[in-house]
Amino acid sequence: MQYILAHDLGTSGNKATLYDLEGNMACSVVSEYPTYYPFDGAVEHDPDQWWQAVCTCTRDLLERSGIPPADIACVSFSGIMMGCLVVDKEGNALRNMLIWADTRSNKQEKFMLERVSLERGYRITGHRPSASYAAAKLLWIKDNEPECYQKAYKMLHAKDYIALKFTGVFATDYSDASGTNLYDLEGRRWSNELLEAWGIRPDLLPELHAAAEVIGKVTPQAAKATGLLAGTPVAMGGGDGSCASVGAGVVAEGNTYNIVGSSSWISMAARKPYFDPEMRTFNWAHLDPALITPCGTMQAAGYSYSWYRDTLCPLDYPSLNRHTEKSKPGAGGLIYLPYLLGERSPHWNHNARGAFIGMGVSTTREDMTRAVLEGVGFNLKIILDAIEKHTPTDSITMIGGGAKGAEWLQILADIWGKTLLVPRYLEEATSMGAAVAGGVAVGAYKGYDTARQYNQIVAQVEPNLDNAGIYRDLYDTFKLAYEQLEPVYEGLARVRSADR
């Protein structure tokens, strides 16, 4: 029997998973690596630690599973998006990678918007020009570390670097390219207009490939480091968000999914980008080159829940989940605004902050717990409403660690008024997407529809219509609360700036 090896490079570690060609998970291991915070707003990874994690995981997988290296049909990848890693001609990293959470390049964002309007940048790339993306991070290196910029041969993403270590090939795929602010989404090429406007060297951008494309083979050096056979095919793979789409079975127009992790996003498959008039949402390239994934991401979903647990209610998650059963829908008139990390979609406000509104002497811990879960649901509904102006949907596939909680799923179903579909693999959906891309690349699968067969729906949650009126009224109040607090957020931001 043959297997596909998928590496999923995340923010805290690499998950390596072996799937057989029928979609069964044979074995999975994780190797963690640290995240570095050199100064306020700076968030980095050491790429050599990625490679060490990949090598460790691969050897552990082969040993634990007992699967011989000759049975590995191919290696494929998923990885964190929106980062910036510069390497030299030999493929050596010239510095740590500025990962997706790095926002040090606010000055560069302002420079970008002075030369290309917000609307024009959004129309070309499907994203707002922002410090969150690779272009601004690269400009920060250019401005602050000019020697590093001059020595740079290519700019890569996380999975690109590991693919390079396996094959010696400098490349990226369309999905990761769509997270750079430098990719012409509809033209499926690097944007000369943006490169010229922002003064970025075109030669720094790697060659573009489809995710389901074999870009090379495992080199003898990589074989020695990982225990794989030299000559094993290596597929390009994709960014983790786009791999998650495939793993969730979102492989046809109109399919929609939500991932609930530390952050959360709602996304659907579409034939064309959706350019929201208010630019609340954005667009990724799907692993399937024929598709786009309109998307909206909020910053603190599961993170809000973990913050609440660690700060205000130190219980395990099963106990916290049971709290929600002791508080009625609407949490006794308590609202939670989930803006602990500022917010991307739908508000794009770095200064927004979290809040409980409506507390009284009768407010209970159970009300507060439920309000946190409802607040995340209300914010995601704003994103869902924006996406549904493009294509309405009746059901949403749920993945991620948050989808394990039956209580939270019911709250989300009630707030959104949608049927929620729960697949076989929740936290493994991203690596499943990478594995399917690898299978398509080597001809084991005819197309991405295979993902729907392998990650089948095993349960569904129907909305409780008795709660619809309560949540409809509270949703309007939730939106109003943010609007009224916007000037307060600005004032608090000035205080934080003065403190620094």
Image: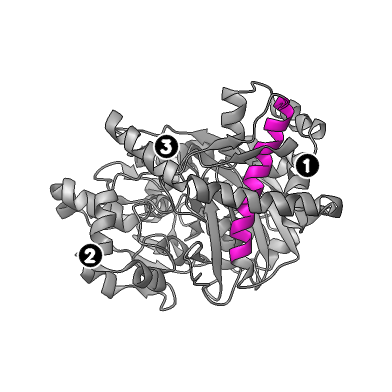
Checking the image for residue 198, the label placed there is 2
Residue at 47% across, 40% down? 341
Q: Quote the CA–CA distance across marks 2 and 3.
A: 35 Å
Identify which amino acid the numbered label 3 is placed on: Gln
Q: How is the image coloured?
A: one colour
**Helix, strand or loop status at disc 1:** loop
Residue 310 shows in the view: yes
Residue 472, given in percent of the width and then of the height, sits at 73, 54
Q: Which residue is mark 3?
A: 52
CA separation in Å, label 1 and label 2: 50 Å
Say what secondary structure mark 2 lies in.
helix
Q: In the visual, does 26 lie left or right of 430? A: right
Q: Secondary structure at mark 3?
A: helix
Who comes first in sequence, dot 2 or dot 3?
3
Instruction: Say which residue appears at 14% left-offset and 50% top-offset.
Output: 146
Is 446 displayed left or right of 198 in the figure? right
Which quadrant holds the N terminus? bottom right
Residue 377 magenta = yes
Q: Residues within 10 Å of mark 1 (few under 14, many from 20)?
A: many
Residue 88 visible (yes or no):
no
Q: Amino acid at mark 2?
A: Trp
Q: Which of the numbered marks, if any, corresponds to residue 329?
A: 1
Instruction: Tell me, yes or no, whether the highlighted magenta stretch contains residue 242.
Output: no
Residue range corresponding to the magenta coloring:
362-386
User: Where, by quadrant of the figure, is residue 244 drawn?
Assistant: bottom right
- Where does residue 278 sit, x and y in percent of width and height? 48, 66
* Rendering coords of residue 130 (x, y %): 35, 56
Spatial separation of the CA atoms under disc 3 and disc 1: 48 Å
| Residue type, numbered disc 1 | Pro
Mark 3, mark 1: which one is toward the viewer? 1
